[in-house]
Amino acid sequence: MQLSETVEWGLHACLALAMLPDGARIPARALAEYHGIKPSYFSKAMQKLVAAGIVQSTEGRSGGLAMGKPAEDVSLLQIVMALEDHQVLFRCTEIRQKGPCAAASRHYRAPCNIARVMRKAEAEWRRVLAETSLAELRQSATAEPVPGVNEATQTWLAETGAVRGT
Amino acid sequence: MQLSETVEWGLHACLALAMLPDGARIPARALAEYHGIKPSYFSKAMQKLVAAGIVQSTEGRSGGLAMGKPAEDVSLLQIVMALEDHQVLFRCTEIRQKGPCAAASRHYRAPCNIARVMRKAEAEWRRVLAETSLAELRQSATAEPVPGVNEATQTWLAETGAVRGT
DNA sequence: GGATTCATACTCGGATATTCTATGTCCGAGTGCTGAGGG
DNA sequence: CCCTCAGCACTCGGACATAGAATATCCGAGTATGAATCC
């Protein structure tokens, strides 16, 4: 039942993108290297975020990735769902309607009670993720920075010339 | 990220066990057939519940499965966790500590903010599941029965002689 | 000097392997029933 | 008639295949760049 590891990648990548200056873009390859991730598979995760409109991709020689919308409008739920193909955690296959003692399907209008509780729990999970925006994470990251990381990042970006755009 | 299908099986199976008379037991094979499930893999799920103490198994010729503790003391969370090997949904691999700009690990005493939100959401999910007991599900099932199913079940149990014990 | 053109380097995106987990199957060890045999 | 005992049918539990998803890799299509060329 584990979430895909791409979820972790995507969340950190989006946070990094949200911390760049407005309009700036960075190649997927550099973004992967920055996080110590193999770039090949990482790009697949980014593709899903691009398809969802969360991230914007620019092709061409000085292309790269950038936020597709303001960080305030991106919730963690959007990112997770995009990366997990909008799947649900618990899938009810209506096994109550199977087996030798099941009634005709028209008698099962009320939803399965087990599925109902599972969905309720899932809704709470989603609620927390929906309530947290990327902007809040960015706020925390800038308010309580890890010593040295921001400076090292600026240096690294300048040295590698990874950031393009405004 | 889907939960295993065995979770659905286990939940329905536990509910069925909880609706049997006190002390009664039923073979895993019959319980699988009742739900229209292939018995071979179903037994693997039951093994996990037995190991967790939720279900009790009796060997021998007239053996079978029974509840291991009162339905009031069994939450849905216990069942789900037992079947999913107590895994967590989101696994933080601390990628913030990787890459060329990471600081020394002693500077990362505060937990990762992304992981914190994910864990908070997961805690809410667990909370709902922990708040619901098997006894509540049994209550709903007896209060709003699907027409004919209970009768058919009694008949089927009598015909097949699947129920043993007091 | 300035505009144009063209080769180029670099980007994303999808087609293609490989590994790992979930699912499915099977058979052996163990245990309580049951019926025969003896007292 | 009642007790003993051995055979047996049936149970669970774990070892062994298979299917599907997640992970990892590679190469091709497309585009902005920038140098070379011409006016």
Image: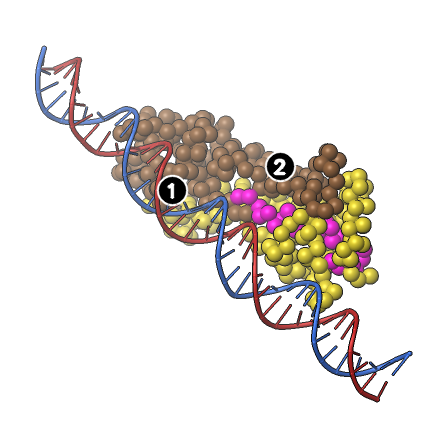
Chain colours: A yellow, B brown, C blue, D red
Q: Is residue A145 visible?
A: no
Q: In the visual, does B155 lie left or right of C1? A: left
Can you say which quadrant of the picture contains the C terminus of chain A?
Answer: bottom right
Name the spot of residue B160 as percent of width and height, x first.
Answer: 27, 38
Residue in the picture at 38% in, 42% down: B41
Q: Which subunit holds the residue at mark 1? A: B
Check contact, mark 2 vs mark 1: CB within 8 A: no
| Circle on res. B82 | none
In the image shown, does B155 or A67 lie closer to the viewer? A67
**Disc sitting over residue B123 in the figure:** 2
Foreground pick, A126 / B23:
A126
Q: Position of residue B14 (x, y in %)?
A: 43, 35
Residue B17 is drawn in which quadrant? top left
Residue designated by label 1: B41
Residue type marked 2: Ala
Determine if the magenta segment contains residue A52. Answer: no
Question: What residue is shown at x 60% (from left), y 55% (from top)?
Answer: A41
Taking the image as shown, residue B87 lies to the left or right of residue A26, namely: left
Amino acid under disc 1:
Tyr
Residue A61 visible in image: yes
